[in-house]
Image: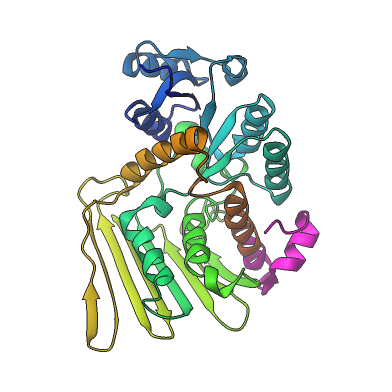
Amino acid sequence: MNAADVSFGLVGYGMFGAHHAAAIASTPGARLTAIAVRSPERQQQAREAHPGVEVYADFRQMLVRDDLEIVSVAAPNTLHYEIGAEVLQAGKHLFLEKPMALSLTHCDELLDLAQEHDRILAINHELRLSSLWRGVRDLIADGAIGEPLHVLINLTRFPYRSGTDGWRYDRERVGSWILEEPIHFFDLARWWMAPAGQPESIYARANARLADHPELHDNFSAIVNYPGGPYAVVSQTLSAFEHHVSAVVTGTDGAISAHWSAADARSEKPLFGLRYGLGDDITTVSFDKPTGELLELADQMAAMVACVRQGAPPPCSGNDGRWSTLLCLAAEHSVETNAVVSIDDFVKRFGGGLKM
């Protein structure tokens, strides 16, 4: 233990919260100091896995500690705003699982609190740290395909795990399944399409496989429109098997193609690849580092240490997290109304002014 280590608290110790804890504990320059989780069973699991780390039943008791610098939140979606607001008000930096919140107003309030208390607010869109998906963005930035015109991202995977106490199948707690998975790909598409500006409108369609959960969308597709004609397509199905993601970015001078496949998103041995070119002129990109959800989670924790100690910007800011949440909410509104939704109009109706 080093006095210069960044002291982390963690709220939530379900399946993914346990991964947060392990990532923090294994990150150089980070120290897992405290864990807050309501379930007595989970409290015992946390104590056994992390001896010497203080475990609390109420996260508010943890927040009064003077030695905590940053709090990682891995609680069910409906709690993100409540917990995040109290973390920021307590003067701690905040690393918040996606989605940032379940409403645009709550996203805006978290951004305002972070600014008011001069705290870092970062959102866990871990794909931004992936050697594969970041590699796509680096090729775009290097001009490998000219100006990006079209993004297509497709996910097929096995049905969702239920989550602790079934929260992921409870609309009140999950918000929507659009906020649970496509949110990552809205973030990627917006990141890759940055040269085209900010999204202007969205049109989405969805349906449900489960008759007892018609409000939860297993199958979902959306078109996100950008100024001047570029657009992105994000599509998913949760009614398949394994975990397969493919992406193509087409530009004025060629295309980038990327894929990732494994039995599970947390697999340590995925199959993945990245190529770019036009016609018969194709280049294959090689990787020195593997890619996977848990590897990127560890990289996120290292990035947060750099934010606190070196003033580095977070890989995904609170404003980026607000945008991905906004696109999900606007997409759901489009599904409900079967209409193209203007982003500006949606913000005027359901939130404050756009924070660019």
User: In the displayed structure, does residue 345 sit left or right of residue 93?
Assistant: right
- Residue 9 lies, in percent from the top left, at 50, 23
Q: Is residue 241 visible?
A: no
Is residue 166 magenta-colored? no
Hey, which residue is sitting farthest bottom in the picture? 279
User: In the displayed structure, does residue 291 sit left or right of residue 14?
Assistant: left
**Of residues 221 and 138, which is closer to you in this image?**
138
Is residue 336 magenta-colored? yes
Residue at image position (31%, 43%) is 295
- Residue 31 lies, in percent from the top left, at 41, 22
What colouring style does the render use?
Answer: rainbow
Which quadrant of the rendered structure holds the N terminus?
Answer: top left
Q: Is residue 199 above or below residue 25?
A: below
Q: Which residues make up the magenta segment? A: 332-356
User: In the displayed structure, does residue 173 sit left or right of residue 298?
Assistant: right
Q: Is residue 174 visible?
A: yes
Residue at image position (68%, 40%) is 110
Among the 4 quarters of the image, the one containing residue 330: bottom right
- Residue 220 lies, in percent from the top left, at 50, 65
